[in-house]
Image (tube, rainbow, N blue to C red):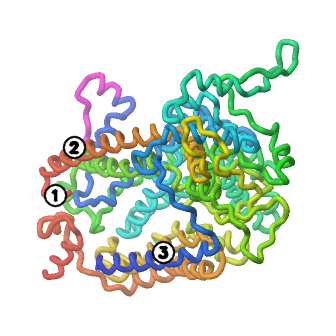
Amino acid sequence: MSEHEYVPKSKAGKWFNDRLPLLTLGAHLTDYPTPKNLNYWWTFGGILTFCLITQIVTGIVLAMHYVAHADLAFASVEHIMRDVNYGWLIRYIHSNGASMFFLAVYIHIFRSLFYGSYKSPREVIWIIGLMIYLLMMAAAFMGYVLPWGQMSFWGATVITNLFSAIPLVGDSITTWLWGAYSVDNPTLNRFFSLHYLIPFLILGLVVLHIWALHVPGNNNPVGIDIKKPSKDTVPFHPYITIKDAFALLVFMIIFAGFVFFTPNVLGHSDNYIPANPLVTPAHIVPEWYLLPFYAILRSVPDKLGGVILMFSAIFILFVLPWLDTSKVRSAVFRPIYRQFFWILVIDVLMLGYVGAMPAEGIYLVLARVGTIYYFLHFIVVMPVVGYLEKTDPIPMSISEPVLTGGAEPSLARKVNDKV
Amino acid sequence: MIKFNIKLLVLSFLLLISLRPLQSAEMVDPIKVNWSFKGLTGTFDRASLQRGFQVYKEVCASCHSMQYLSYRNLGEPGGPEFSEQEVKAIAASFEIDDGPDSQGEMFTRPGKPSDKFKSPYPNVQAAIAANGGAYPPDMSVLVKARKGGANYIYSVLVGYEDPPPGVTLDDGVYYNKYMSGNKIKMPNNLMDGLVEYADGTESTVDQMAKDVTTFLAWAAEPELEERHRTGVKVIIYLVLLTTLVYLSMKKIWSRVNTEV
């Protein structure tokens, strides 16, 4: 992997490095040649790492004060908010942190879609990323259950009930998941246990994600391979570290804005009502980041059909590298695909919006149109457009557009067109 | 090309926003009050919190519990900030169940600042039974537990009206303009001059509703003032640090012929 062999300067360093080459790894990470034309959409990997660490650290402190029991959970959260030193701050960072995590991951995923980062030779990075995303959704869903408010309880009831749609064994599976005959104390206990476990699984997958990234190296806005490392790349440190730090700080300002000034705006007010199995809320809605999938689920009149479609919406992404037939990675040079990309963004935003609305009237129609389009995008648009599209001319190397027209790839393309 | 995309995005958002009114055609939006605790640097009006506590104690507390608050909270910074003596006196005015003692007997004693607010009913079932089948919700986090927050609570308190013609109400059900479904089991308990404020403020219905809502907003978010203060400091710190890092980044990247 390493281009030039790293030799520690000190004797002790050499002794240790011969036995465990941690210093070689460190040297690889700092020297890692990174395309110098990466734009700010590429800073979200670092931001996501920060989000994961933040959730783990705040989560560990919260777990010291939280009580996973149906009769005590709600009160223990209030205890954290009122009596634990800076408990309100830790909890608000954790609850808003989940939203910030998803905001960042959605930008990260759509960046990959736009610039074709999922394509060969980066399919494994993409697939590991999707596994992380799946685990994130599981962790977030279970975390939302822990305060044991009305939305916690009823959200858990709705989502676990999905499994009862499985033919023959559905009800048995649901009972097994609950550990009871309804969502109850055993459910809360196991959700807490899994909620504590999953972030560490994510951490392990993040290591694999970065490892897999460091084999082919980063994609970049023009989506072409590195021709001359000396001209096209910069060492990760200090160039990318300082840029990631800048982007992370901007992200943290937004994060802090939520935590300190509108800490509950992303949550649902019903979750400050203690869970009550006898009173169903008027509208059961998941957290905002799951709404597009919720809309897909509810757009199908049949329960099993809805569940299959909802899971398909995620699993179809796993085969994306093979559905996309275009040889060109970056949408910058794909005039037709670029339009469809933005339509997909709007489609997903619309699905998210109708997911928050009651499943009736115009919302149901929009949900169905949105769902159909979502699948059409991947099953029809991507293979067909990739096959038929006449792409724009691609620059010879990363350095070329930089030398002729500045870093903005669209500018580079125009310059290229004239040539 | 980019312009076209932004247009598309804006258009779709306008479409979404225009759909919004469909959602809540029957509900009346709560009255917007210019609360002192709104905004980035909002703080509670100390006198209003103290009056609000008086309204809670003399009017609401006969049915509504506030089980997550302790009497000591009344003296803590950012709240009503009663003096230590006042907090002790308030706590001592309640008889708290305690025990068992060394003989295994339960007993009652005067309250201490460390005690939780005494609940009016021993349990939820007793509260439901005493209130015609409707549970008077615990008010510790009520402001956070209702869409519209403080505005909504205030609106319900002043939103009692005679039912419009054609609407018939069962016994023990009242008409309220702002309550979802317009039916509420809590009677209109506020009338002008109901409590005698210690600070001489005239106790109109509007004044009492505002004071008790302020008190409930503090009860739900006792950290609000500290949160706002800390938030301003954190944001200033982050903006300064971001500026420094930005300048460092520009300097470092000036070594390569690429814009950042």
Q: Residue furthest top?
A: B102
Task: Answer with left or right where residue A408 lies relative to residue A175.
Answer: left
Q: Check chain identity for marks 1 and 3: say if they share one.
A: no
* In front of the other: B109 or A317: B109
Circle 3 is placed at which residue position? B17
Parent chain of label 2 = B
Q: What's the amino acid at mark 1? A: Lys
For the question of whether residue A207 can be seen, the reply is no
Disc 3 secondary structure class: helix
Say whether residue A342 is magenta: no
Q: Quarter-wise, where is residue A328 in the image?
A: bottom left
Between marks 3 and 2, how big is the CA–CA gap?
A: 39 Å
Horizontally, residue B260 falls left or right of residue A220, namely left
Image x and y of residue A300, in percent: 67, 77
**Horizontal side of residue B44 vs A334, given as left or right:** right
Q: Nearer the viewer, residue A16 or A202?
A: A202
Q: Specify the subunit that label 3 lies on.
A: B
Q: Which secondary structure type mostly characterizes the magenta part of the structure?
A: loop
Residue A261 locus on image (x, y percent):
44, 49
Q: Residue at x 59, y 39 (%)?
A: B197
How many marks do you count on the picture? 3
In this figure, which residue is indicated by the disc labeled 2? Answer: B244
- In the picture, which quadrant includes the C terminus of chain B? bottom left
Residue under label 1:
A231
Which residues are drawn in magenta?
A: A2-16
Q: Is residue A217 above or below residue A360?
A: above
Mark 2: amino acid = Leu
